[in-house]
Amino acid sequence: MTVLETARPHPSTSRQWWVLTVRIITPTLRNGEVVTLIAASIMFTVGFYIPLKQMMGALANGMSSYAQYLMPLIALQAIAFASLSAAFRSATDSVLGINRRFKSMPIAPLTPPASRMSASMYRCSIALAVSLVCGHVIGFRFYGGLAHTVGFCVVVLLIGAALSFLGDLIGAATENPEATAPLMLLPQLILGFLSVGVQPVERFPSWIQPFVRNQPASQEVYALRALAGDSTPMAGPVSWSVIGPTLLWVAGFTIVLLPFHVLVASRRR
Amino acid sequence: MVVASADNTTATRGGLGDERPIVERDFAENSLRRLVPHTWVLTARLMRRWRRDRAAVLESVAMPVVLLVTLHIVLDDGISQVTGHSALYGSVPLIAMVAAMSGSMVGGIGLMRERSDGFLSRLWVVPMHRASGLLSRLAADGVRIVVTTAVILCAGLVMGFRFHQGFLASVAFVFVPTVFGLAFTVIVITLALYAANTLVVEGTEVIWGMLMFFSSGFVPLDQFPRWIQPVVQHQPVSYSVEAMRGLSLGGPVLAPAVGMLLWSAGIVAVCAIPMAVGHRRASMRG
């Protein structure tokens, strides 16, 4: 007995986090998840660009090409798809009871959600990389120098983190994988179409313009468009008044979701 | 069938005090006389589940309606300038197809859950017609597609969509999405029986997303670059949209309807045997 007591392991939180993260990432390489993620990112590029180029191309607001105009929306759609599918994952985990199992083990309460978040960031990185490659193919270029290019990627990943946080909460709160399915692609398409990512705000009916201009997707499109730059000055300047709203949306979103996460995590069954 | 014959002998074997009800068996479990009532019971079960799972049902109907309104706001100006009539005659059929396809995921996820929690194996040891499990899923999905199409149609009518081809054509309109919608359900069920859980959901979304973007209901055919127009023109969702456009606004109905039926028949022909085999395997697994 004494031998057992002295041999009792003292698991390190960072190691547990790594193990739980790898638990989610490893299957994605085998079961085709990475392939669907890449396919989805390609779909958003070709799906918005090819049908809309001719009809909307003239409306690109003085920018050098419709690809340059559309790219922020493509990146946002790809990242939203990658992160909101966290809802299905965490709902499945909840239904299978693995979260309950983790609660009964010597694991810090924040480790399982942290590992789910880092796995989501892995998915977001893939989506961002693929959509940047696709954007390059259709003619999108960075004009803003290294700092702005890095800023573009960081802002996209921050948005991805906030959306993963939301997706994880939806899944854990509903515990109903069936109910998460309609929440994945349709809402992001709706917000994407109702943003300045496809056409300038002046093209919308006047009654909906305030919503279109101020909803998070539009503010994010403005920020990303400025960070990407353009050969013409129409992309807008990189300033706090352009980037700030996006950062505030992301921060506000996370702060509002935090208590709900704590509530769901501390729920006992 | 082995199960059934073993079941018949229990009455004679039960000598140790376990009394079991002796069920009258007029027909074999796989007789056609059993197929209809068994399928009906299981279909009613699935529809009762949906009625009680309000969140999933509301989302799968409400989201497409919101997307229809959105597409109308964003694309109507551009499309009516190009074609000369309202974009609704393309977008109402398109969204009906999107709702039919995206909603089939709810059934697919339900099937995966019932496989993993053992419900399918439970049904397999019951003297039930072997085809009724799959047929009931298709029947329930058919009902779901007709209902969602009707809701989307009502939203379209409020926004200014009108039938110009008479009463029969408008009734036929409601049933058009069922044809390819059910073929799509067959794909989802087959995927659900073979692939990993998450792949089914995301793969399905990518498939219907591509079919939506590259269809003649999203933007008119001549707005696509010339090299991709044949693909857009001959894919199943475009065929369905064109058939529904013909039934509402006017135009050819027969040619697109034949294309849609050929696509659906092809999909069912390819998937039928893998689906039946996969369902049997999933049912016999612990």
Image: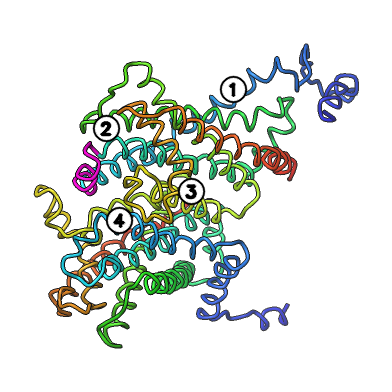
Query: Mark 3 and mark 4, same subunit?
Result: yes
Marks 3 and 4, how far apart at CA: 33 Å
Residue type, mark 4 in image: Leu
- Mark earlier in primary sequence (1, 2): 1
Q: Position of residue A105 (x, y in %)?
A: 56, 67
Query: Mark 3 and mark 2, same subunit?
Result: no
- Mark earlier in primary sequence (3, 4): 4
Does the magenta run of residues contain B81? yes
Dot 4 falls on a residue whose secondary structure is helix
> Which chain is indicated by disc 3?
A
Of all residues, the one furthest to the front in this rendering is B226
Pick whichever, A42 or B117, lies toward us: A42
- Judging by the rendered image, the residue that carries numbered circle 4 is A52
Dot 1 falls on a residue whose secondary structure is helix
- Judging by the rendered image, the residue that carries numbered circle 3 is A177
Query: Mark 3 and mark 1, same subunit?
Result: no
Marks 2 and 4, how far apart at CA: 23 Å
Q: Residues within 10 Å of mark 4 (few under 14, many from 20)?
A: many
- Judging by the rendered image, the residue that carries numbered circle 1 is B41
Query: Are the residues flagged by discs 2 and 4 in contact, CB closer than 8 Å?
Result: no
Q: Is residue B233 above or below residue A113?
A: above
Marks 1 and 2, how far apart at CA: 34 Å
Query: Are the residues flagged by discs 3 and 2 in contact, CB closer than 8 Å?
Result: no
Residue type, mark 2 in image: Gly
Marks 3 and 2, how far apart at CA: 30 Å
Does the magenta run of residues contain B127? no
Dot 2 falls on a residue whose secondary structure is helix
Residue type, mark 1 in image: Val
- Judging by the rendered image, the residue that carries numbered circle 2 is B156
Which range is magenta? B74-86
Q: Residues within 10 Å of mark 3 (few under 14, many from 20)?
A: many
Marks 3 and 1, how far apart at CA: 24 Å
